[in-house]
């Protein structure tokens, strides 16, 4: 059986220390998506100006929530969330007992795009699916993580098309600018996966030489038709 563990992902657990605490309500006021309904969902924590700090998938585990995030960013995410916790009786910490798993599945459960495959949580296993995941994700034109998304406006990261934002959930950090862009239908730039040889160094966010691909932050009019995934709506 092919390895399924994504070793470059980590899980951050949010747990109530008091029966009166609701971690979903706490997170609901901070992130871009609705975490009080069906999970998992893809969401981001933004700056007040609406730029990406972290992106992650949110899972439910009883009264707890688990954030499926980049391993390298987990500690910074914990620190940022802890700033908002104030005196609420909530613990925010890594969960080393669980890992993120993935397999290719044309009709998977990834909330961004079913074709991304199936994810689940469980104890880590030998081996790594990181390289296979990266190749599969980029083949579908889906971007994630700090190298590709950080400091960009959330809707420029194709968040609306990939179910990463709720426009009905109410306020969250960065909501005002995000909502304004959506209302005005004014998303002038997009993240797009392009052949490395045609990448614009001035607009390049990340490059993957082994795959011959790059991620560029381009003006909509500069996106070649063959680079546009079927799910991408350029308006």
Image (cartoon, rainbow, N blue to C red):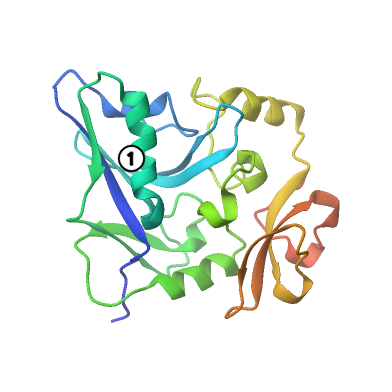
Classify 10 Å Cα crowding around label 1: few (below 14), some (14-19), many (20 and above).
Answer: some
Q: Residue at x 61, y 78 (%)?
A: 209
Residue 215 point in image, percent of width and height: 65, 62
Name the outermost residue toward the right. Answer: 221
The number of callouts visible is 1
Q: Residue at x 68, y 31 (%)?
A: 182
| 57, above or below 198, in the image | above
- Left or right: 218 in relation to 82: right
Residue 202 point in image, percent of width and height: 77, 59
Q: Secondary structure at mark 1?
A: helix
- Left or right: 38 in relation to 219: left
Residue 83 visible in rendering:
yes
Residue 2 point in image, percent of width and height: 32, 80
Q: Residue at x 65, y 54 (%)?
A: 231
| 89, above or below 55, in the image | above
Q: Residue at x 28, y 28 (%)?
A: 23
Residue 40 visible in rendering:
no
* Residue 104: quarter of image: bottom left
Residue 24 point in image, percent of width and height: 31, 29
- Point out the image quarter for the N terminus: bottom left
Which residue is at the front of the view, 39 or 178?
A: 178
- Point out the image quarter for the C terminus: top right
- Residue designated by label 1: 78
* Residue 12: quarter of image: top left
- Left or right: 124 in relation to 168: left
| 7, above or below 147, in the image | below
């Amino acid at each position: 059986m092919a390895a399924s563990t994504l070793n470059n992902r980590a899980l951050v657990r949010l747990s109530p220390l008091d029966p009166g605490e609701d971690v979903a309500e706490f997170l609901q006021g901070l992130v871009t998506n609705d975490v009080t309904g069906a999970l998992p969902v893809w969401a981001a924590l933004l700056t007040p100006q609406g730029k990406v700090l972290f992106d992650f998938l949110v899972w439910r585990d009883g009264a707890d929530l688990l954030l499926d995030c980049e391993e390298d960013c987990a500690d910074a995410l914990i620190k940022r969330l802890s700033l908002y916790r104030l005196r609420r009786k909530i613990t925010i910490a890594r969960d080393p007992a669980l890992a993120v798993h993935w397999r290719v599945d044309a009709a998977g459960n990834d909330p961004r795009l079913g074709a991304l495959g199936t994810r689940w949580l469980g104890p880590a296993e030998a081996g790594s699916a990181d390289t296979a995941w990266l190749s599969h994700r980029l083949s579908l034109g889906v971007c994630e993580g700090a190298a590709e998304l950080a400091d960009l406006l959330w809707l420029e990261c194709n968040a609306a098309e990939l179910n990463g934002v709720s426009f009905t959930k109410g306020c969250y950090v960065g909501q005002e600018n995000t909502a304004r862009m959506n209302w005005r239908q004014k998303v002038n730039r997009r993240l797009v996966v392009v052949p490395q040889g045609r990448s614009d160094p001035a607009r390049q966010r990340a490059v993957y030489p082994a795959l011959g691909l790059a991620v560029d932050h381009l003006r909509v009019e500069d996106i070649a038709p063959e680079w546009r995934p079927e799910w991408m709506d350029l308006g």
